[in-house]
Structure formats: structure tokens, C-alpha cells
Amino acid sequence: MSLTEEACCTWDGGLVVLLDAGRSSIAPPAWTGKGEGERCELFGYDQGVLGAVIGLRSFRADFDNPSAKLEGIIAAIYDIGCFIGAIVAFLTADRYGRKGSIKWGCWIMVVGTVLQTSATESVQLIIARTLTGVGNGINTVNVPVWQAESFKSHNRGALLIIQSALIAFGHPLSTFMGLASSQAEPSSFAWRWPIAFQGVFLVIILIALPILPESPRWLAQHDRLEEAVEIFARLEGRDVSIEHPSVVRQRDEVKASVQQELLLGSASWGEVFTEGRNRNISRVLLGAGPYMMNQWCGINSLAYFLPITFERNIGLSTQLSLIISGVLGFQYFLISWLPYFFIEHFGRRKMLMSSAAACCFCMIMISSMLALDTTTSQWAFVAFTFLFFDAFSLGILPVSWMYASEIMPLRTRNKGVALGAASHWLSNFVVVYITPQAIQGLGYRLYLIWAALNATFVPITWLFYPETARRSLEDMDAVFLNESFGVTKTREPGTRTHAEPHVATATD
């Protein structure tokens, strides 16, 4: 079967949405404020659907009316599982390949989904959600790496937008699934079916995986250059031979990169924590930065408290609050596609800095509106929340999930991305638990802290982050070889196009 790059993108985009059906960006403990039936609206399908069903009478009856603390453990343990999965990927993924690791991650998620759906005790549900998180953590490491190693430099960023856009899709999907299934109350089907639904995605992934190509760079690294060249040709387009100039260029670049790494000897687990000629630890720290920005920009605090604010401060019903949350999520999903059209033109740096600056402004306004505490200001809070989600989706969201995989060298790419993803999930867990206490102690002032953090992301990005747009992964090796750790000089997108050969340089 001949796969064009577009066909690969279509398949891979499908894979991403299925994987991201189990991904979450937040997992807060249950809200304990006033109002019967209040629930947290969590982010991403797996966590989001739990937030949509955890307040159902059938769910509470089946688990003996769990306390707020237990609800928090059930929700947040998923992030610990994802953290463990990222560490597992750090240790094993280079051995099994990108496709093989994703396959194992999916099977672990299948087992976890079955155990969640059939759970009758809280202990089983906690174990099942941890297991599902482990599988998802493995996948959140390997999918971005697989994509980055397969797409061409001139449109790699645009195609990676598919991943971040479909992360956003989990929010409205889980919300409306929960609303629909609630009509089956008081049957336990009302909460079991939405949780089981993620298994449908996983089955489709496992069916699709054999059709998709392995990462050509992973193949080349494992002395399977001929297979890698065939995949480069397939990704280049229909009826493209292995002698096509673009295929030959990619082959020569990857071959040279692999030969260079062979001179350094076999990669060890500890190598990623040392600087060395490849500047490994510098790349790990830079790659982890956007992952951390994703969590510490304050998105989780907003997403967690959004429906609670609608209910408590504006007086909307639980159902209407969830509907508005779903509408926000749907807009978030639509807006998150926009970077597809200009991320390669403007580059990662400008989009990340612009997004952080806009998020800072929105957080200042959100804090101000909550401090005023009037009906008008609360509706203004809703408007700026919508704008915050939009600003987040235009820069921080997509860049955070692609940057690490673009800057790590081939020999330690999977390990470096795994450490970045681990920092993401650990930060997720920390933010989840500090938010309720911070809201209680600081109130509206908490959002000023998020504003200040967003403000720091702008100079940090400008000073230290080299631009990766329109540069091949091998070009980035040249960038780091020619720049010492410190202020970057690579601030503009590269000059690559899909049609022209290119010699890697650090300053193009």
C-alpha cells in the first residue's frame, strides 16, 4: 500500500484523536462547595467523562457515596499513572520502536478501560485508572516522537497541530457524552457506557497500526536504512522512487546523523542527563519547558472551576453549566485548528510568546472580574475565560506537545521527550492539588499568580528557545552543535521547502 504524506497525516490524525480520547490536561479533586450535584468538569475525554458522571446518582450509589477526598484520588490518580507511563517509555521505547510502544500502550489502556467499566469497588476503579494512565503516558511520549520523525520539515509543525487540536476535542466530547448518558439514570449504564466508550477508540487504533509505517529515523538508527528509505519514498508521494532527490537528501542526512552518533558509541540511560557534545541536558531542559508552560499557565485552574463558577456565581443549573462548558470546549476545539495555517510561517517562538502574553492579559482580567464580584463582572469573567482558552490553543497548547520531539537528537530523542512528558504529568498532578487550597486562601489573587507566570514565559522563550520551524531534525542537531548553552541566535524559521535540497546549518 502506497501512502502519501497526506494519507499518512489522515491516518495519524485519526490515531491522535483516538489516543487523546484518553488524555487529560487536568484531574482535580472534587469541588466541595455549596450546591447539591456540583461536579468538576475535567479536561480531556477520560478525565472529562469522569467529571461528567461522578455526580450521577448511579455512580455515587455504586461506590457508596464516595467522599470528596476519595473522589479526588479517583480523578487525580490518572495523572500519576501517566507519569509512570512516561518513565516506562523512557526505559523501554527505543527497544520496541514507536509503533510497538504505542501498541503496548494501547493494550494497557484496553485492560484499564475494561477494569474501569466493570468496577464495583473504589479500589478497583483507582487501580484501573492508574493502569489506563500508564498506557496513556507511554502513548503521549511516542506519538509526538513518531510524528516528528515521519513528517517533512516544511509542514511538520502544521501537521502536528492535528494532535493538539484533537486534544481539545476531548473536552466537548466528554461533556456531551456525559449529558447524553445521564438520561439513563438511575441505571449504572449511565456512567459505565461513557467510560467504556474510550475502548472503541483503542480498538480502532490497534486495527490501524499495522497499516501505518514505522518511524524511518528509528529504522535507520537500528541498522534498517533500506526500510527507512522506502518509507521516505512512500511519505513523499505516490509513485515516488527511492532515487527521488528529496528521498536521497533525507537518506543522506539521516545516514550522516546515525554515523555521527555511532562515533559517540551506544547511548546509555544516563547520557540524557549529561551535556556532552550533543548538549543533551540543555535540550532536555528546553524541551520540558513548554510542557511545564502548558500546566503552569493556569489552564487547569480555569477548566476545573469553570462550571462551578457558572453554578455558584451566576446561578445557572448544573445541566446548563455543563452545556456552556461544552460550547466553550467546542469553540476551543475549532480555534485550535487555526495554527495549522500559519505555524510554519510565524514559527514556534512567536506563537508561544504571543500566546503567553495573551494568556497573561486574560488572567489579569479574570482576576479583576472575580474581584468585582457583580453579575456583570461574572459574565465578563465567562467572556475572558473563552478568550483565555482561545489564546492558550493558539500557541502554548500546540508548541508544548511538539517542541521536545523537534529538538532532541535521534539517539536520545525518546528519552528526552519522555522526561518532558513526565514533567508535564507531574506538574498536572501538583497543580490539581494546590488549586483548591490556593483558591480558598488567595481567591481572585491566584489568577494574578498565573498572569505573572505567563508573563515570564515571554522573555524566557525569546532568550533561550531556538526556532525549529522549517528545519529538519538533523538541522536542529547543527543548531545545538554551533550554539553554546545560553541565549539563542536562531530566532527565525528556516528556509526549507518541500522541493529544495538543503544543507543543515545553524544560522539559516
Image (cartoon, rainbow, N blue to C red):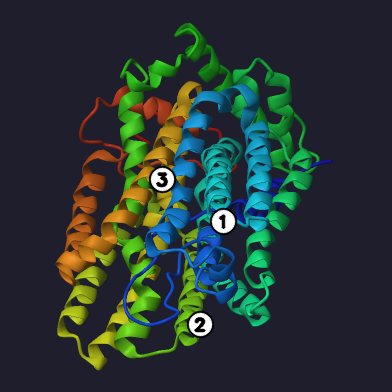
The local crowd at label 1, few if under 14, some if 14 to 19, many if 20 or more residues have their Cα within 10 Å, is many
Q: Which residue is mark 2?
A: 323
**Label located before the other in sequence (3 or 1):** 1
> Disc 3 residue type?
Trp
Front: mark 3 or 1: 3
Q: Mark 2: which secondary structure?
A: helix
**Which residue is painted at 65% across and 73% down in the image?**
190
Q: Which residue is mark 3?
A: 425
> Disc 1 residue type?
Ile
- The numbered disc on residue 162 is 1
Q: Is residue 475 above or below residue 32?
A: above
Q: Position of residue 446 (x, y in %)?
A: 19, 65
> Disc 2 residue type?
Ile
Name the residue nearer the viewer: 59 or 271: 59
State the separation of the CA atoms marked 2 and 1. 25 Å
**Which residue is painted at 73% across and 20% down in the image?**
226
